[in-house]
Amino acid sequence: MLNPIALTLGPIQIHWYGIIIAVGAMLGLFLAIKEGKRFGISQEFFFDMLLIGLPSALIGARLYYVAFEWGQYKNNPSEIIAIWHGGIAIYGALIGAIIAVSIYTRRKGYSFLRIADICAPGLIVGQMMGRWGNFMNQEAHGGQVSENFLRGTLHLPNFIVNQMNIQGAYYHPTFLYESLWSLLGLVVLLLLRRVSFLRAGELFMSYFIWYSIGRFYVEGVRTDSLVFAGPAWLASLLKTMWEPMSSFGWGAMEAGKNIRVSQLLAVCIVLAAVAIIVLRRTVFKQTSRYSDPIEPVVRPSNGYLQKVD
């Protein structure tokens, strides 16, 4: 087992998880700054956005998790802020970051969707790196598998196989599945943003579609899913959609609860993102393209928007 603590300075312990998350955030920031230069956006804009977006993402991730696990927090409210005990959700992080960044971009006079397009590759890089933080903590894994499955079927190196041995049992390396899916998604987004037909906002929607498809199938083998009791027809539909991946097994469900929140949300996000793309093209006649210049506007005291020269 790898030591999750990278460095100890007196009473302070620096965890690999935090270091990996920080590295992922810096890589994402680098990608955004580099692409932002093509549109004449200063790097300070993205630095400030990161300073606002990261804590907002953390708060959103925690509140999302607490909301779905309220039963274990309602009688012990002090645990709500004890994030070091675990319990954050990536969809909550996205909600928190989107709310904060949308306010920030509006105040700076930029279109949120245009900035989100620029940041989409950075987002998926951050998620790709973050899963390796889960790996160091031996968390967010899937159900039990054999050692031979990891070595003989997946052909994983020893350091991954050994880290997936948790208290004498081996588990699905779901961190790796999602990380590799995100890596492939990064390549897709980097290629997609150079095609001429891409409209403004569609790279951000493509990020949601790509990530949510991967999350839907990876979630099916995780054992720590947020779940709730839903109608049998919906549970059956989700399981049928996931069935092509049955060779990876189906993770344990809580008794009496049959809907995995992240799977349901993933399906809703894919449908919503596709609908937004179609409606913006057909109903709202969106003509602005990803490659078009990005010009900030200001809102003077008279309330009318005007371009900044």
Image (cartoon, rainbow, N blue to C red):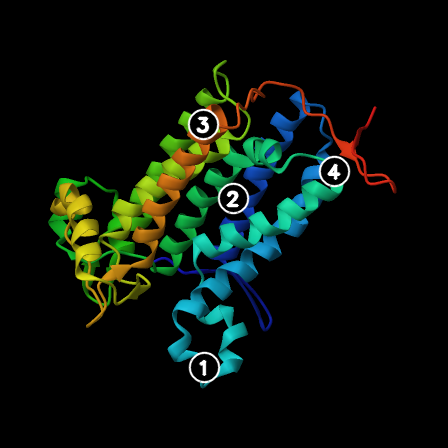
Q: Are marks 2 and 1 in contact (CB under 8 Å)?
A: no
Amino acid type of the residue tagged 2 in the rendering: Gly
Q: Which residue lies most toward the right here?
A: 301
- Mark 2, residues whose alpha carbon is within 10 Å: few (<14), some, or many (≥20)? many
How far is mark 4 from mark 3, CA to CA? 24 Å
Q: Which mark is residue 189?
A: 3
The residue tagged 2 is 24
* Snapshot quadrant of residue 136: bottom left
Say few, some or many: other residues with alpha carbon within 10 Å of mark 1 (under 14 / 14 to 19 / 20 or more). Answer: few
| Amino acid type, label 1 | Lys
Query: Is label 1 in a helix, a strand or a loop?
Result: loop
Secondary structure beneath dot 4 equals helix
Q: Which mark is residue 206?
A: none
Residue at image coords 34%, 59%: 138
Q: Secondary structure at mark 2?
A: helix
Which residue is identified by label 1? 74
Mark with earlier residue (1, 4) = 4
C-alpha gap between disc 2 and disc 1? 33 Å
Q: Dot 4: few (<14), some (14–19), or many (≥20) neighbours within 10 Å?
A: few
Considering only order in the chain, which callout, 4 or 2, is on the residue closer to the N terminus? 2
Q: Looking at the image, which residue is at 39% across and 55% down?
A: 134
As drawn, the label of residue 44 is 4
Mark closer to the observer (2, 1): 1
